[in-house]
Image: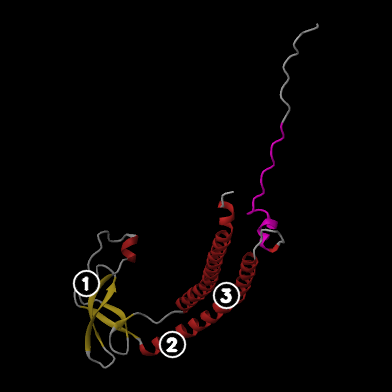
Amino acid sequence: MAGEIPPAQPPPAVPEPEPEPDPGRDPYLLLWRWRRNPLRRRSDRLRAWIALGLAVAVLAVAPLAMFAVGDGAHRHYRDTAEHERRTRDHRPAVLVHDAPRHPEPGSDESKKVRYPVTVRFAGPDGTTRTGSTEVEPGLSEGSTVQVWVDADGAITGPPLTAEEIRSRTMGWAVLAFLGVVLAGIAAHGVTGLVLHRRNLAQWDEAWASTAPRWSRSP
């Protein structure tokens, strides 16, 4: 029929905009400092070379530092353990007074708990000495325990074991490795901060020469 208004039509579909690329997932964008583009500054390229150099240096130096420090620590603790074995010995000692009793005798905790008590023992020179050592709970006065005594006649701990030497050596080796890595990260951060301040100074100089032309009245 002439003059009849056609029914309304739905609006045309508008394509959704494509999501912007994520620099953290696109390796091409991660290397933007290496690509030629009009916005790339000399400092950007310099920072990229510094980052590459630091990464190579860390990968080369960290294992060497880990090995060198670990080897030095192992020799140190090995010599320390050998010295302790030569200068310390196990001696019997007698409790001067009763050891405290555990609140829950016979429990698993009571088997692990140790209480400090005063004991009497013979020193390396044969003289009677007294000292403090940790013993099981509930031991009565006059009970005999074994204590480690050093060359000066003082109660001390046992010599380092192979497991203790290994764990301490690994600890120092890991610290050396992490120290090199953290030093590389710190160097990268410092150089980045210096270059950023240099860029800001250059921008200030450029704006100081350009601003008068923008603000000049016609």
> Callout 2, which amino acid?
Glu
| Residue that extends furthest to the front in the rendered view of this protein | 218
Q: Which residues are magenta?
A: 14-33
Give the quadrant of residue 18.
top right
- Earlier in the chain: of badge 2 and badge 3, it is 3
Residue underneath mark 1 = 140
Provide the secondary structure element on which disc 3 rests.
Answer: helix
Label 3 or label 1, whichever comes before in sequence order: 3
* Residue 128 belongs to magenta span: no
When the figure is inspected, residue 111 is found, relative to residue 96, above or below; the finding is above
Q: CA distance from mark 1 to mark 2?
A: 35 Å
Q: Residues within 10 Å of mark 3 (few under 14, many from 20)?
A: many
Residue 82's label in the rendered image is 2
Magenta stretch: residue 25 in it? yes
Instruction: List x then y, in percent, for residue 98.
Output: 20, 71
Measuring 56% from the left and 59% from the top, which residue is drawn there?
207
Instruction: Quadrant for residue 5, please give it.
Output: top right
Mark 2 lies on a secondary structure that is helix
Q: Residue at x 73, y 27 (%)?
A: 12
